């Protein structure tokens, strides 16, 4: 009987192996050879799934985006007060545990790498900007935003805040730990919303 | 007569050559060989100034920090109203022209690279956090901050905002152009200060 291999599962395993290599050795170490070794595959077997390194790295990056999106969609379906829901969603984007830290590390390494690969993945369209615009509009429609805010600039401000905090959490997790990130997000949301999120952290 | 070479000038020229290589080819291309070629030097001559690639890249990165710091110190000495001064300083950190864009690109590539080189340069201590804390305290002492702000969290928020905006300006300069960055910074400063910065842009 021929061996049955789940193609999608195998691709995901290879992508996850590439994350581990990036985490350990940086993008310089993310060669097809090293990734095959980490995944326990021959170079030929790996090439069966991904014919180029860029193809593999793009798949690994898209898998990060998919995972984050799935977690966010799950929260969006929860029965939570609007501002609490938004806080929970923001905490899914900013790395506060080792799993999210690994995702962010891959994102960061990938963006730096992809800048000089014009033909491949467009790193700036990771969906975060559009997602945050939806969150601000959601607060606006729920009549929770303070008066006289410029919603367009609030989207831009939140986008900078989220990505800047995510980067700092990655680079300096000891200073900017989970508690401090939580505090900062509550502080920011309270500064733009009419009633306070409870400060239980 | 022996040829007289200004050692510091030559090192700076090499660092600037390494910036150009990073800008064009990314960190993957920033080999000692490519940098020597760009600087018009033999490999041996370059090694006279920098014995390892890490040493050279660290020097190039420190030169970025030094240049930004010099520009900021120059503004700090100007006779400007406090909030206008702070706006000008923030606009020196966030890339809004090709020179600053190149600095930011080097910074970004370097940080991604240095994450996996534990022994070398500590990328998280670029002085921006301390500098922004000084700015918030300066506003506080000038009695320009709104009441009931948490200055510690305002420092953290400004730090995230500045680095997030800088990163987005680098990745997506068409959407986030100079005018929009200016608008965002004025908007943020007005949200924390008691009287408005004039909106002349």
Image (cartoon, coloured by chain):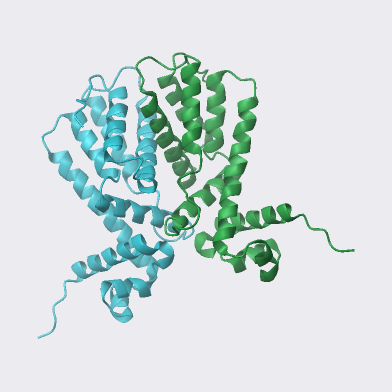
Chain colours: A green, B cyan
Q: Is residue A4 left or right of residue B141?
A: right
At which x and y percent is residue A88?
Answer: 56, 28
Q: Is residue A39 left or right of residue A109?
A: right
Residue B30 sits in which quadrant? bottom left
At which x and y percent is residue B160?
Answer: 39, 37
User: At x 31% / y 61%, what residue is drawn?
Assistant: B60
How many numbered marks have been drawn onto this rendered protein structure?
0
Which is more toward the observer, B139 or A2? A2
User: At x 42% / y 34%, what residue is drawn?
Assistant: A161
Residue A65 sits in which quadrant? top right
At which x and y percent is residue A117?
Answer: 45, 59
User: At x 46% / y 56%, what residue is drawn?
Assistant: A114
Q: Is residue B26 visible?
A: yes
Specify the farthest residue to the front: A119
Q: Is residue A49 above or below residue B83?
A: below
Q: Quadrant of the C terminus of chain A?
A: top right
Q: Is residue A200 visible?
A: no
Which is more toward the observer, B169 or B13? B169
Q: Quadrant of the N terminus of chain A?
A: bottom right
Specify the farthest residue to the right: A1
At which x and y percent is residue B177?
Answer: 30, 41
Q: Is residue A29 above or below residue A8?
A: below
User: At x 67% / y 53%, what residue is drawn?
Assistant: A12
């Amino acid at each position: 009987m021929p061996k049955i291999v789940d193609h999608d599962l195998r691709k995901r395993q290879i992508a996850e192996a590439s994350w581990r290599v990036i985490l350990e050795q940086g993008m310089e170490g993310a060669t097809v050879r090293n990734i095959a070794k980490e995944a326990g595959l021959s170079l030929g077997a790996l090439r069966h799934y991904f014919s180029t390194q860029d193809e593999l790295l793009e798949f690994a990056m898209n898998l990060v985006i998919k995972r984050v999106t799935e977690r966010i969609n799950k929260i969006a379906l929860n029965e939570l007060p609007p501002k609490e829901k938004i806080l929970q969603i923001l905490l899914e984007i900013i790395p506060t545990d080792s799993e999210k830290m690994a995702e962010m590390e891959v994102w960061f390494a990938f963006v730096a790498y992809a800048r000089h690969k014009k033909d491949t993945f467009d790193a700036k369209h990771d969906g975060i900007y559009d997602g945050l615009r939806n969150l601000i509009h959601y607060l606006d429609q729920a009549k929770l935003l303070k008066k006289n805010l410029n919603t367009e600039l609030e989207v831009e401000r939140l986008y900078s805040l989220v990505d800047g905090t995510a980067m700092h959490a990655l680079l300096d997790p000891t200073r900017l730990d989970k508690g401090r990130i939580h505090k900062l997000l509550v502080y920011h949301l309270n500064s733009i919303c009419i009633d306070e999120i409870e400060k239980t952290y």
